[in-house]
Image (cartoon, helix red, strand yellow):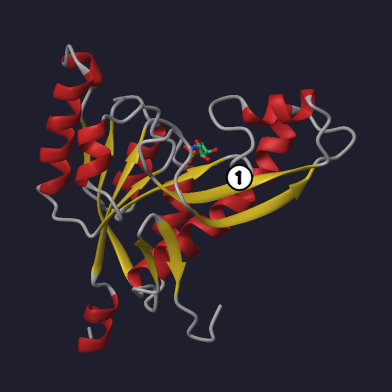
Amino acid sequence: MSIDNTMNKSLSVVVLISGNGSNLQALIDAAKEESYPARICAVISNRSDAYGLQRARDAGIIQKVLSHRDYAERESYDQALMSLIDSFNPGLVALAGFMRILSEAFVTHYSGRLINIHPSLLPEYKGLNTHQRVLDSGEEIHGASVHFVTLELDGGPLILQSPVPVLADDTAETLAARVLKQEHIIYPQAVKWFAEERLKLVDGVAMLANKGED
Ligand code: GRF
Protein backbone atom coordinates (compact mmCIF):
# COMPACT_ATOMS: atom_id res chain seq x y z
CA MET A 1 0.00 0.00 0.00
CA SER A 2 1.86 3.05 1.20
CA ILE A 3 5.62 3.44 0.89
CA ASP A 4 5.81 3.44 4.67
CA ASN A 5 4.15 0.07 4.90
CA THR A 6 6.58 -1.48 2.41
CA MET A 7 9.46 -0.11 4.42
CA ASN A 8 7.90 -1.39 7.63
CA LYS A 9 8.15 -4.94 6.31
CA SER A 10 11.80 -4.65 5.40
CA LEU A 11 13.02 -7.61 7.47
CA SER A 12 12.49 -11.00 5.83
CA VAL A 13 12.48 -13.94 8.22
CA VAL A 14 12.90 -17.63 7.46
CA VAL A 15 11.36 -19.79 10.20
CA LEU A 16 12.63 -23.33 10.77
CA ILE A 17 10.28 -25.84 12.36
CA SER A 18 9.93 -29.55 13.05
CA GLY A 19 6.48 -29.84 14.57
CA ASN A 20 3.37 -28.08 15.75
CA GLY A 21 4.51 -24.58 14.94
CA SER A 22 2.57 -22.63 17.54
CA ASN A 23 5.47 -20.18 17.79
CA LEU A 24 5.42 -19.91 14.02
CA GLN A 25 1.72 -19.10 14.31
CA ALA A 26 2.48 -16.36 16.83
CA LEU A 27 4.96 -14.85 14.37
CA ILE A 28 2.47 -15.17 11.50
CA ASP A 29 -0.21 -13.45 13.57
CA ALA A 30 2.14 -10.67 14.64
CA ALA A 31 3.26 -10.06 11.06
CA LYS A 32 -0.36 -9.63 9.96
CA GLU A 33 -0.35 -6.30 11.77
CA GLU A 34 0.41 -3.54 9.32
CA SER A 35 2.80 -1.86 11.74
CA TYR A 36 4.81 -5.03 12.42
CA PRO A 37 8.24 -4.54 10.85
CA ALA A 38 8.98 -8.09 9.66
CA ARG A 39 7.51 -10.60 7.25
CA ILE A 40 7.97 -14.35 7.07
CA CYS A 41 9.32 -15.14 3.63
CA ALA A 42 9.50 -18.94 4.03
CA VAL A 43 8.95 -21.78 6.48
CA ILE A 44 11.26 -24.78 6.28
CA SER A 45 10.72 -28.08 8.09
CA ASN A 46 12.95 -31.13 8.33
CA ARG A 47 9.79 -33.22 8.76
CA SER A 48 7.05 -33.51 6.17
CA ASP A 49 4.41 -34.19 8.85
CA ALA A 50 5.05 -30.97 10.78
CA TYR A 51 1.72 -29.27 11.43
CA GLY A 52 3.44 -25.92 11.13
CA LEU A 53 3.62 -26.50 7.36
CA GLN A 54 -0.17 -26.37 7.30
CA ARG A 55 -0.12 -23.15 9.29
CA ALA A 56 2.25 -21.64 6.72
CA ARG A 57 0.08 -22.88 3.86
CA ASP A 58 -3.02 -21.37 5.47
CA ALA A 59 -1.21 -18.05 5.77
CA GLY A 60 -0.06 -18.12 2.14
CA ILE A 61 3.60 -18.46 3.08
CA ILE A 62 6.04 -20.55 1.06
CA GLN A 63 6.76 -23.83 2.85
CA LYS A 64 9.55 -26.27 2.08
CA VAL A 65 10.47 -29.67 3.46
CA LEU A 66 14.12 -30.65 3.57
CA SER A 67 14.36 -34.04 5.21
CA HIS A 68 17.50 -34.83 7.18
CA ARG A 69 16.89 -38.48 6.30
CA ASP A 70 18.07 -37.76 2.76
CA TYR A 71 21.54 -36.82 3.99
CA ALA A 72 24.14 -39.14 5.47
CA GLU A 73 25.87 -36.47 7.52
CA ARG A 74 24.87 -33.45 9.56
CA GLU A 75 27.31 -31.27 7.62
CA SER A 76 25.86 -32.13 4.21
CA TYR A 77 22.30 -31.60 5.45
CA ASP A 78 23.21 -28.26 6.94
CA GLN A 79 24.90 -27.17 3.69
CA ALA A 80 21.73 -27.98 1.77
CA LEU A 81 19.66 -26.19 4.40
CA MET A 82 21.88 -23.12 4.15
CA SER A 83 21.47 -23.07 0.36
CA LEU A 84 17.71 -23.31 0.70
CA ILE A 85 17.51 -20.63 3.38
CA ASP A 86 19.80 -18.29 1.46
CA SER A 87 17.67 -18.62 -1.67
CA PHE A 88 15.14 -16.50 0.27
CA ASN A 89 17.78 -13.97 1.27
CA PRO A 90 16.49 -13.50 4.82
CA GLY A 91 17.76 -10.94 7.30
CA LEU A 92 16.91 -13.25 10.18
CA VAL A 93 16.55 -17.00 10.69
CA ALA A 94 14.22 -17.93 13.55
CA LEU A 95 14.28 -21.44 14.99
CA ALA A 96 10.82 -22.35 16.26
CA GLY A 97 10.88 -25.89 17.56
CA PHE A 98 13.47 -26.99 15.00
CA MET A 99 14.64 -30.25 16.53
CA ARG A 100 18.13 -30.43 15.09
CA ILE A 101 21.57 -29.84 16.48
CA LEU A 102 23.21 -27.36 14.13
CA SER A 103 26.71 -27.73 12.72
CA GLU A 104 29.45 -25.21 13.37
CA ALA A 105 29.35 -24.10 9.71
CA PHE A 106 25.64 -23.37 9.96
CA VAL A 107 25.84 -21.43 13.23
CA THR A 108 28.84 -19.45 12.01
CA HIS A 109 27.19 -18.64 8.68
CA TYR A 110 24.17 -17.06 10.41
CA SER A 111 26.00 -15.54 13.35
CA GLY A 112 24.12 -12.52 14.68
CA ARG A 113 20.99 -13.30 12.66
CA LEU A 114 19.99 -16.67 14.10
CA ILE A 115 17.67 -16.80 17.11
CA ASN A 116 15.90 -19.53 19.06
CA ILE A 117 13.11 -19.87 21.57
CA HIS A 118 13.63 -22.30 24.43
CA PRO A 119 11.14 -23.47 27.08
CA SER A 120 13.10 -22.65 30.24
CA LEU A 121 14.76 -19.77 32.01
CA LEU A 122 18.18 -20.30 30.50
CA PRO A 123 20.87 -21.00 31.50
CA GLU A 124 18.75 -23.36 33.63
CA TYR A 125 17.33 -26.44 31.97
CA LYS A 126 19.04 -26.56 28.61
CA GLY A 127 18.06 -29.43 26.35
CA LEU A 128 14.86 -31.47 26.18
CA ASN A 129 11.93 -32.30 28.51
CA THR A 130 12.35 -29.06 30.40
CA HIS A 131 8.85 -29.00 31.91
CA GLN A 132 9.09 -32.44 33.51
CA ARG A 133 12.62 -31.74 34.74
CA VAL A 134 11.46 -28.48 36.32
CA LEU A 135 8.62 -30.32 38.09
CA ASP A 136 10.93 -33.12 39.22
CA SER A 137 13.29 -30.56 40.74
CA GLY A 138 10.52 -28.85 42.69
CA GLU A 139 11.15 -25.45 41.12
CA GLU A 140 8.69 -22.67 41.88
CA ILE A 141 9.50 -20.62 38.79
CA HIS A 142 9.87 -21.78 35.20
CA GLY A 143 9.66 -19.84 31.95
CA ALA A 144 10.86 -19.24 28.42
CA SER A 145 13.87 -17.59 26.80
CA VAL A 146 14.73 -16.12 23.43
CA HIS A 147 18.43 -16.12 22.62
CA PHE A 148 20.91 -15.70 19.84
CA VAL A 149 22.23 -19.06 18.68
CA THR A 150 25.90 -19.80 19.20
CA LEU A 151 27.89 -23.01 19.14
CA GLU A 152 26.93 -23.86 22.71
CA LEU A 153 23.59 -25.70 22.67
CA ASP A 154 20.92 -23.45 24.23
CA GLY A 155 23.79 -21.33 25.48
CA GLY A 156 23.78 -18.21 23.31
CA PRO A 157 23.33 -14.64 24.57
CA LEU A 158 19.91 -14.05 26.09
CA ILE A 159 17.55 -11.56 24.46
CA LEU A 160 14.33 -11.84 26.43
CA GLN A 161 12.86 -14.08 29.12
CA SER A 162 9.44 -14.54 30.65
CA PRO A 163 9.00 -16.26 34.03
CA VAL A 164 6.04 -18.55 34.69
CA PRO A 165 5.05 -19.73 38.20
CA VAL A 166 4.91 -23.47 38.76
CA LEU A 167 1.55 -24.37 40.36
CA ALA A 168 1.08 -27.14 42.92
CA ASP A 169 -1.12 -29.23 40.64
CA ASP A 170 0.87 -28.66 37.44
CA THR A 171 1.64 -31.53 35.10
CA ALA A 172 4.25 -31.24 32.37
CA GLU A 173 1.37 -30.57 29.97
CA THR A 174 -0.32 -27.78 31.95
CA LEU A 175 3.02 -26.16 32.65
CA ALA A 176 4.06 -26.42 28.99
CA ALA A 177 0.82 -24.77 27.93
CA ARG A 178 1.39 -21.78 30.23
CA VAL A 179 5.02 -21.47 29.15
CA LEU A 180 3.97 -21.60 25.48
CA LYS A 181 1.61 -18.67 26.05
CA GLN A 182 4.59 -16.62 27.13
CA GLU A 183 6.70 -17.89 24.24
CA HIS A 184 4.04 -16.57 21.87
CA ILE A 185 4.48 -13.11 23.37
CA ILE A 186 8.24 -12.86 23.67
CA TYR A 187 9.24 -14.39 20.31
CA PRO A 188 7.36 -11.86 18.16
CA GLN A 189 8.67 -9.12 20.45
CA ALA A 190 12.28 -10.18 19.93
CA VAL A 191 11.81 -10.39 16.15
CA LYS A 192 10.25 -6.91 16.22
CA TRP A 193 13.24 -5.47 18.05
CA PHE A 194 15.60 -7.13 15.59
CA ALA A 195 13.62 -5.77 12.64
CA GLU A 196 13.76 -2.29 14.13
CA GLU A 197 17.53 -2.71 14.36
CA ARG A 198 17.32 -2.12 18.09
CA LEU A 199 18.54 -5.63 18.85
CA LYS A 200 22.00 -6.72 17.77
CA LEU A 201 24.64 -9.24 18.70
CA VAL A 202 27.77 -7.22 19.50
CA ASP A 203 30.95 -8.99 20.59
CA GLY A 204 28.96 -11.95 21.84
CA VAL A 205 26.47 -9.83 23.80
CA ALA A 206 22.82 -9.19 22.94
CA MET A 207 22.47 -5.40 22.86
CA LEU A 208 19.09 -3.69 22.93
CA ALA A 209 18.99 -0.01 22.07
CA ASN A 210 16.54 1.85 24.24
CA LYS A 211 14.26 4.01 22.16
CA GLY A 212 11.93 4.67 25.06
CA GLU A 213 9.35 2.17 23.77
CA ASP A 214 8.10 -1.28 24.72
C1 GRF B 1 8.57 -24.70 22.09
O1 GRF B 1 8.38 -25.05 23.43
C2 GRF B 1 9.91 -24.04 21.89
O2 GRF B 1 10.32 -23.31 22.99
C3 GRF B 1 10.81 -25.22 21.71
O3 GRF B 1 10.07 -26.16 20.97
C4 GRF B 1 8.68 -25.92 21.19
C5 GRF B 1 8.07 -25.69 19.86
O4 GRF B 1 6.69 -25.56 19.95
N1 GRF B 1 12.05 -24.83 21.06
P1 GRF B 1 5.87 -25.09 18.67
O5 GRF B 1 6.22 -26.06 17.56
O6 GRF B 1 6.27 -23.70 18.36
O7 GRF B 1 4.44 -25.21 19.08
Q: Is residue 178 visible?
A: yes
In this rendering, position of residue 84 left or right of residue 6: left
Q: Residue 103: horizontal and vertical position, in percent?
A: 26, 29
Q: Amino acid at mark 1?
A: Leu
Which residue is label 1 attached to?
180
| Residue labelled 1 has its Cβ within 8 Å of some atom of ligand 1 | yes
Q: Quadrant of residue 52?
A: top left
Q: Residue 102: horizontal and vertical position, in percent?
A: 31, 31
Q: Quadrant of residue 69?
A: top left
Q: Residue at x 56, y 32 (%)?
A: 126
Please name whichever residue, 139 or 93, is drawn nearer the observer in this view of the structure.
139
In this rendering, position of residue 156 left or right of residue 75: right
Mark 1 packing: few (<14 Cα in 10 Å), some, or many (20+)?
A: some
Picture quarter with the C terminus: bottom right
Picture quarter with the N terminus: bottom left
Q: Residue at x 12, y 31 (%)?
A: 80
Q: Residue at x 13, y 55 (%)?
A: 89
In this rendering, position of residue 3 left or right of residue 131: left
Pick out the residue farthest to the front: 203
Q: Quadrant of residue 63?
A: top left
Residue 140 versus residue 34 in the image, above or below: above
Q: Residue 113: horizontal and vertical position, in percent?
A: 29, 55
